[in-house]
Image (spheres, grey):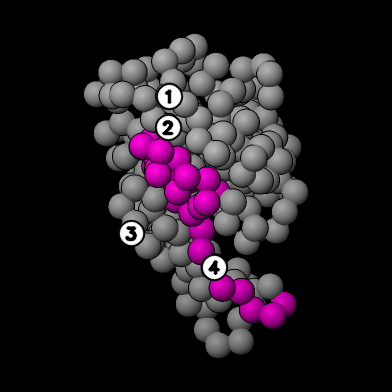
Amino acid sequence: MDRPAKRIAALQGATSHELQGTLSAFARELQSRGFRVAGVIEQSACGVRGACKSLSVKDIASGETIPISQKLGAGSEACNLDPGGLAVACGLVEQAIDRGVDVVVLSKFGKLEAARSGLCDAFRAAILADIPVITAVSAPVSQDWDCFAGGLSEYVEPDIAALAAWWRASHARKSCTQVMAAGASGIERAPRRPYLSAYGGA
């Protein structure tokens, strides 16, 4: 990726489980290198025919798990997503953004977000704060995503190497010049805190 990256990396082209695993792994990699990461990762258990049995999201900054499913009764195979639980998770992400972070990782842009609910306010908060965002985009709402994110987003292959390339290019977009040597994964370590002021840090 030779050109500066766009502000948002959107992942597609894998199963939901695989996409969440990639988001989680990359978030941990950035944290291990000293970057302040906010956001949520989806954790789910689904029935044999795909019905959602247990849904939760893990807040990356605090490690807190927030249930986002509601009981619909025995035998129900309808998706039991609870917008109220997502609203709680969204609020935690917005609070972390207010405190100052380097990147926001959001589980996905799906049907609720397309309807301007779910994690939509967290997306907006990160965009307004000019913070890089990494997310997964559900294929059925790709057109809604393109309308929402406009020219701020680019699709990135759902693997760590592609995300690492996007992350390096995102530094070029920020005109960041003082970076430490890259590790084996190709992801730079977080610079000293004065340099992080460009991302809204102290």
Residue at (42% x, 32% y) in the render: 189
Marks 2 and 4, the one that precedes in the sequence:
4
Disc 1 element: loop
Q: What residue type is labelled 4?
A: Ser
Comparing labels 2 and 3, the label whose residue is closer to the camera: 2
State the separation of the CA atoms marked 1 and 2.
6 Å
Marks 1 and 2, the one that precedes in the sequence:
1
Would you say the residues marked 1 and 3 are in contact, meaning their CB atoms lie under 8 Å apart?
A: no
Would you say the residues marked 4 and 3 are in contact, meaning their CB atoms lie under 8 Å apart?
A: no
State the separation of the CA atoms marked 2 and 3.
25 Å
Q: Residue 189 carries which label?
A: 2
Residue 96 occupies quadrant: top left
Q: Residue 180 carries which label?
A: 1
State the separation of the CA atoms marked 1 and 3.
31 Å
**Residue 30 forms part of the magenta stretch:** yes
Q: Position of residue 139 (x, y in %)?
A: 73, 48
User: Quick check: 149 above or below 137?
Assistant: above
Marks 2 and 3, the one that precedes in the sequence:
3
Comparing labels 1 and 3, the label whose residue is closer to the camera: 1
Which of 145/202 is in front?
202
Magenta-highlighted residues: 23-49
**How many residues crowd around disc 2 within 10 Å: few (fewer than 14), some, or many (20 or more)?**
some
Q: Which mark is residue 63?
A: none
Q: Which amino acid does label 2 sit on?
A: Arg
Q: Where is residue 67 in the image (x, y as percent from the top left)?
A: 41, 66
**Residue 45 forms part of the magenta stretch:** yes
Which of 176/202 is in front?
176
Q: Which amino acid does label 3 sit on?
A: Glu
Q: Residue 64 carries which label?
A: 3
